[in-house]
Image (tube, helix red, strand yellow):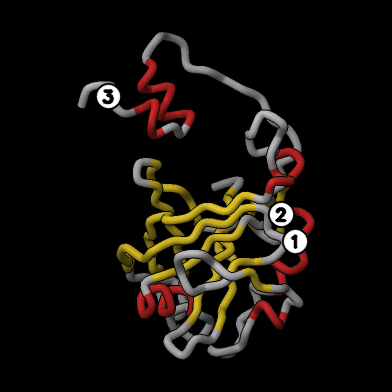
Amino acid sequence: MIPRPIGWISTVDSAGRCNLAPYSQFQNVTFDPPIVMFSANQTTDGRRKDSVRNAEDTGEFVWNMATWALREAVNATGQELAPGVDEFEHAGLAKLPSRLVKPPRVAGSPIQFECVYLNTLRFPGQPPMGTADVVFGRVVAVHIDDAALTPEGLVDVLRLQPIARMGYFDYTVVDNRFQMVIPGDNRALLAGLEGSAEKARPLNP
């Protein structure tokens, strides 16, 4: 399944200790309201990942965009460290306060989503790592660096260069784009593909 967006997830535990980890099983689920998910396998010794436990215990997490410029820090936060170790400090990353949730944001990441936890689907698998926890959250705040926008107010994806997982030890980066618009005059369909909640809603509900 390639390429896979990176869910760079920051959380805090019940004691207020920060955690940051990348997940390549990450995706948006819907846009109205905006919901995202990340899927975490178990640790190499069969424990649930800190990100999952923290999101469930505190009801919050933050997604941070992983970019080419931050690739080494993303990789460093993928190490399996002891619970309670602050991956921000481990990777030399500064923290930014969130507005509506407690987990901090990654300074230098151009876009972040503050999320409230919704639920977890747990899929049993072969030990020690096969079982997966799929965590869902509703986006309650979006942060976009002004430098990440074009003069027209659109996200300049080519400037940001998000990275994605390819499999093995391979990654890729977004460095080109093209457009395809589905034929026809179904405005609601096109609004959904555009991700515009306002355009997709009926004029007279």
Residue 204, given in percent of the width and then of the height, sits at 22, 22
Q: In the rendered structure, find residue 67 and report the number of the disc placed on it.
A: 2
Name the residue at the top extreme: 184
- Give whichever of 67, 97 is nearer the camera: 97
Residue at position x 48%, y 61% in the image: 114
Whether tag 2 and tag 1 are in contact, CB under 8 A, the answer is yes
The kind of secondary structure element at disc 1 is helix
Residue at position x 47%, y 78% in the image: 49
Q: Is residue 13 left or right of residue 138?
A: right
Residue corresponding to mark 3: 202
Q: Is residue 182 left or right of residue 3?
A: left
Residue 104, given in percent of the width and then of the height, sits at 57, 71
Residue 159, given in percent of the width and then of the height, sits at 76, 41
Residue corresponding to mark 1: 71
The kind of secondary structure element at disc 3 is loop
In whole angstroms, how far apart are the C-alphas of marks 3 and 2? 36 Å
* Disc 3 packing (10 Å; few <14; some 14–19; many ≥20): few
* Disc 1 packing (10 Å; few <14; some 14–19; many ≥20): few
Residue at position x 38%, y 56% in the image: 138
**Is residue 145 depicted above or below 114 in this figure?**
above
Q: Is residue 21 left or right of residue 57?
A: right
Residue type, mark 1 in image: Arg
Residue at position x 61%, y 88% in the image: 85
Mark 3 or mark 2, whichever is nearer to me: 3
Q: Earlier in the sequence, mark 3 or mark 2?
A: 2
**Is residue 21 depicted above or below 82 in this figure?**
above
Residue type, mark 3 in image: Pro
Residue type, mark 2 in image: Thr
- Give whichever of 57, 135 is nearer the camera: 57
Asked whether the viewer can see residue 75, the reply is: yes
**Is residue 155 depicted above or below 58 in this figure?**
above
